[in-house]
Image: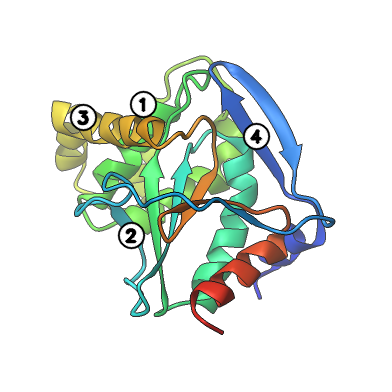
Amino acid sequence: MRTQTKAALAVLVVIVVALGSVLLTSQLRDDEGPVVVDTPEASSLVRDDSRILGEEGDSGVTLVEFLDFECEGCRAAYPVVEDLREKYAGRVTFVIRYFPMPGHHNSERAARAVESAARQGQLEAMYARMYETQAEWGEGREPLDDLFRSFADDLGLDLAQYDADYGSAEVAARVQRDLEDGIDLGVSGTPTFFLDGRPFHPQTVGDFDTALDEALGR
């Protein structure tokens, strides 16, 4: 298990939930079990072109995360999700949906940067870079287009193609569609998870394993 994940498992994970422009903070607690709300799966939860981390699992079990790359709660959840991806590789499908919150000045830009990198086969690399550097750029009020472009350069992307995608109406619409899908599904903050089409609200890190094991029939 990676050191980053050990640290995440050793402390309470803070989930920052934004309602409009107001941030509400909650902690993952040890005294309550996972909450899975039994609601019908919405067709807009996972689209045909939704971004998948790694390979699609063979079990049909899917964990979807609506995320904001400038969200501290999403950054706290990142190593936990990475550990789950390692543990359930080949069995569970991990889907990410962009949900840039209005109170985060650069979150929509970060989403466009990640989507632009994904179009050159570098989704995971840019996804990781955003969280690994978030402490350096998050919560700023200046546009960080140049910084995100430097990430693309570091990853060896074709910068002409990156620039074209990053500034395109198509990529902006892609990010906006994810956001609108989330709103339609009742998402009001990040990170928000759905397990097999139903809202999933983990209270502890271990709730993820419990819920995934149950979904897999173990």
Reading the image, the residue beneath label 3 is 173
Amino acid under label 2?
Ile
Q: CA distance from mark 2 to mark 4?
A: 23 Å
C-alpha span from label 2 to label 1: 24 Å
Label located before the other in sequence (2 or 3) = 2
Q: Is residue 168 left or right of residue 204?
A: left
Residue pictured at 42% horizontal, 18% vertical:
143
Element type at mark 2: strand
Tell me the distance, in whole angstroms, between the alpha carbons under discs 3 and 1.
18 Å
> Is 150 rendered above or below residue 45?
above
Q: Nearer the viewer, mark 3 or mark 1?
A: 3
**Identity, as a three-letter code, of the amino acid under mark 1:** Asp
Q: Within the image, what quadrant is residue 4 found in?
A: bottom right
Question: Which of the pair 92/213 is nearer the observer?
Answer: 213
Disc on the earlier residue, 3 or 4 = 4
| Residue 12: image location, x then y, percent | 79, 51
In the picture of the structure, the residue carrying the numbered disc 4 is: 16
Q: Report which residue position mark 1 lands on.
A: 145
Task: Evaluate whether residue 4 shows in this view.
Answer: no
Q: For mark 3, does the 10 Å Cα neighbourhood hold few (<14), some (14 to 19), or many (20 or more) residues?
A: few
Q: Residues within 10 Å of mark 2 (few under 14, many from 20)?
A: some
The three-letter amino acid code for the residue at tag 4 is Val
Q: Residues within 10 Å of mark 4 (few under 14, many from 20)?
A: many
Residue bearing the label numbered 2 = 52
| Among the 4 quarters of the image, the one containing residue 3 | bottom right
Whichever of labels 3 and 1 marks the residue nearer the N terminus, that label is: 1
Tell me whether circle 3 and circle 1 mark residues in contact (CB < 8 Å).
Answer: no
Which of the 4 image quadrants contains residue 26? Answer: top right
- Mark before the other along the chain sequence, 2 or 1: 2
